[in-house]
Amino acid sequence: MSPVVNENILSAECYLWDFDGCFADTEKLHFLAYREAFSAFGHSISEASYYPSFTHLGDGTRREIEANGLQISEDEISRLKFSAYSRLIRQGPVACFPETLELVRLMRSRGAKVAIASNSSEEEIRTVLDTAGFPTEELDLIVGKQNNLRKKPAPDIFLHALQLLNCQPNRSIVLEDSNRGLQAAAAAECPAIWIRTRYNDGLVSNEQRIGEFSHSQLLALLRSMG
């Protein structure tokens, strides 16, 4: 790993985590919720195409409707998906990635602030964390979607979190698992790390980043830095 990457990680005053598929292992539940919403109109979506379209690129509902010539309202799909997802995360099982808690604690041990900055609502995030048993006191801030903030790939959610934390973009690191998240980080002028998981394996992005790691690889790197 290059000295530039090490320097960026060591000098970070703030880490901004994306939530779904990056901090918490919830992407499968999002897929199941969307599948349920579309099935109400007699349409089936495949898991293989879901992650590249809905998760990685974003705007998946519009893409699915247009690609298949469906006479369905995006708002109706969103409403049904929200209802299904809210039920699924309360039923469980829901989990954060196994390395997440130690990663957060290592980041904070260096005096850095750690926050979640996500397109999901704060209510959904807190429900997942509570169900997963994650100690929210380890986090300095949780920022979810708000009416006055554009969703990623716009930088608004990251910039809002940085403002609340009183941190500078160039001294902060974003951890993301999707192309749209990396786009948002670049627009916010934050260095970014692409977290690699089974959901984005094989996907590509041309967005700027200082590195890409699995959770276990990032954990090993932070441990090696002392």
Image: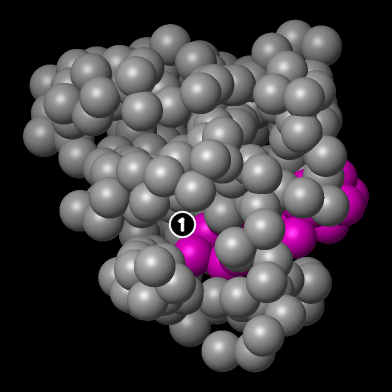
Dividing the picture into quadrants, the one containing residue 134 is top left
Is residue 3 in sight in this rendering? yes
**Which of the two residues, 54 or 216, is positioned nearer the viewer here?**
216
**Residue 207 percent across, percent down from the top left:** 78, 70
Q: Residue at x 59, y 21 (%)?
A: 143
Q: Residue at x 45, y 41 (%)?
A: 108
Q: Is the residue 23 above or below the residue 217 in the image?
A: above
Q: Give the crowd class for mark 1: few <14, some 14-19, many >=20 residues within 10 Å.
A: many
The residue labelled by disc 1 is 50
Q: Residue at x 11, y 34 (%)?
A: 93
Disc 1 element: helix
**Residue 75 percent across, percent down from the top left:** 63, 19
Q: Is the residue 69 above or below the residue 132 in the image?
A: below
**Which of the two residues, 167 or 157, is positioned nearer the viewer here?**
167
Dividing the picture into quadrants, the one containing residue 148 is top right
Name the quadrant of the N terminus.
Answer: bottom right
Q: Amino acid at mark 1?
A: Tyr
In the image, is residue 196 part of the stretch drawn in magenta? yes
Q: Residue at x 34, y 43 (%)?
A: 105
Is residue 197 in sight in this rendering? no
**Residue 219 percent across, percent down from the top left:** 34, 66
Residue 194 relative to residue 19: left or right: right
Q: Count the marks.
A: 1
**Residue 179 percent across, percent down from the top left:** 67, 62
Residue 171 relative to residue 16: left or right: right
**Which of the two residues, 80 or 57, is positioned nearer the viewer here?**
57
Q: Is the residue 64 above or below the residue 46 in the image?
A: above
Dividing the picture into quadrants, the one containing residue 11 is bottom right
Q: Which residues are magenta?
A: 176-198
